[in-house]
Image (tube, grey):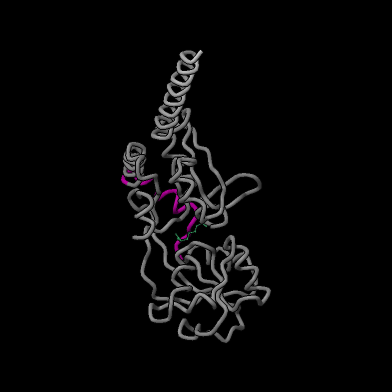
């Protein structure tokens, strides 16, 4: 009897070990021929919804990458601040969301080469008394949770921010812009291209120029998933070099 119990527990341990190996191997490469990209599709022109479809620069470039790798692209639309944790845990193969490369994020994930850039700008109502970023002190600021705009704005004044108590984080950029229109906040800090798209789509808003540093957008991967990172990066490099990425960007961003 005792021996049988022992045998069973040994077999169970073996089975668990085998299953775990399976999962480990799976998370190292794309699952069943799929490339699962996490994004937050409230960020035109990089990613946004047209009906049920997620379109935009990131969606199209990711599709080109997946095609090159012979994988089927699957896009998961999630909150921006759950992209990195989901990539870290292996739930998603990569994160592509107009995501800025920062030192803090680099501690959690690896990044591809950069394929685009952005700058944080300030959106205000047309009749706003805020004329430049020097007028932001003590104003109510809106930003999307977890974004660089939120991170900069909520920093302490000594570090160039406006203090956490003055910043409201919204689940996405569209909600922050709604709050601005409804007078719940006095301005919204967000990346320049989405800012242009939101201002074009909503009456009575304008953009203030800022001189914040240029941010690099890149694709993120789990630290341990260097194999996929290299493959995607090689594909991305080719697509940048042969002009395919520029073609997609030009389709969505008209030179002004
Ligand atoms: N570039 C900013 C950042 O990385 C904002 C990105 C927001 N992207 C999105 N798909 N909502 O923090």
Q: Position of residue 60 (x, y in %)?
A: 48, 44
Asked if residue 44 lies left or right of residue 227, the reply is right
Q: Is residue 63 magenta?
A: no
Residue 135 percent location from the top left of the image: 50, 86
What secondary structure predominates along the stretch shown in magenta? helix
Expressed as whole percent of the image width and height from the top left, the position of residue 27 reads: 42, 35
Q: How many numbered discs sit on the rendered protein?
A: 0
Q: Farthest residue in the front direction?
A: 2
Instruction: List x then y, in percent, for residue 238.
Output: 32, 41
Depth order, front residue of 8/82 = 8
Residue 193 located left or right of residue 181: left
Q: Is residue 210 above or below residue 215?
A: below
Residue at 40% across, 48% down = 220
Q: State the extent of the magenta-drawn residues as a range.
A: 241-256
Above or below, 56 against 32 in this view is below
Q: Is residue 162 above or below residue 38?
A: below
Q: Residue at x 44, y 62 (%)?
A: 255
Q: Residue 203 vs residue 65: left or right? A: right
Residue furthest to the right: 182
Magenta run includes residue 246: yes
| Front residue of this view, candidates 108 and 63 | 108
Identified at 48% across, 78% down, the residue is: 163
């Amino acid at each position: 009897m005792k021996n049988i119990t022992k045998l069973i527990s040994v077999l169970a341990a073996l089975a668990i070990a085998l299953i775990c190996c399976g999962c480990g191997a799976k998370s190292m490469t794309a699952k069943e021929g799929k490339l699962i990209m996490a994004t937050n599709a409230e960020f035109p022109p990089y990613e946004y919804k047209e009906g049920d479809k997620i379109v935009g620069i990131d969606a199209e470039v990711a599709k080109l990458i997946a095609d090159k790798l012979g994988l089927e692209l699957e896009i998961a639309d999630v909150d921006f601040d759950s992209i990195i944790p989901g990539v870290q845990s292996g739930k998603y193969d990569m994160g592509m969301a107009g995501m800025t490369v920062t030192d803090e994020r680099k501690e959690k994930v690896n990044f591809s080469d950069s394929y685009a850039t952005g700058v944080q700008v300030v959106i205000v109502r047309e009749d706003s008394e805020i004329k430049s970023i020097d007028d932001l002190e003590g104003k109510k600021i809106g930003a999307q949770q977890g974004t660089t705009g939120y991170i900069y704005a909520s920093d302490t004044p000594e570090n160039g921010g406006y203090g956490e108590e003055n910043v409201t984080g919204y689940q996405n950029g569209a909600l922050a812009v709604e709050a601005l229109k409804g007078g719940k906040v006095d301005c919204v800090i967000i990346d320049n291209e989405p800012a242009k798209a939101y201002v074009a789509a909503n009456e009575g808003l304008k953009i203030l120029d800022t001189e914040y540093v240029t941010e690099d957008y890149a694709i993120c991967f789990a630290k341990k998933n260097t194999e996929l990172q290299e493959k995607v990066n090689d594909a991305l490099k080719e697509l940048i070099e042969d002009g395919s990425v520029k073609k997609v960007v030009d389709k969505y961003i008209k030179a002004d």
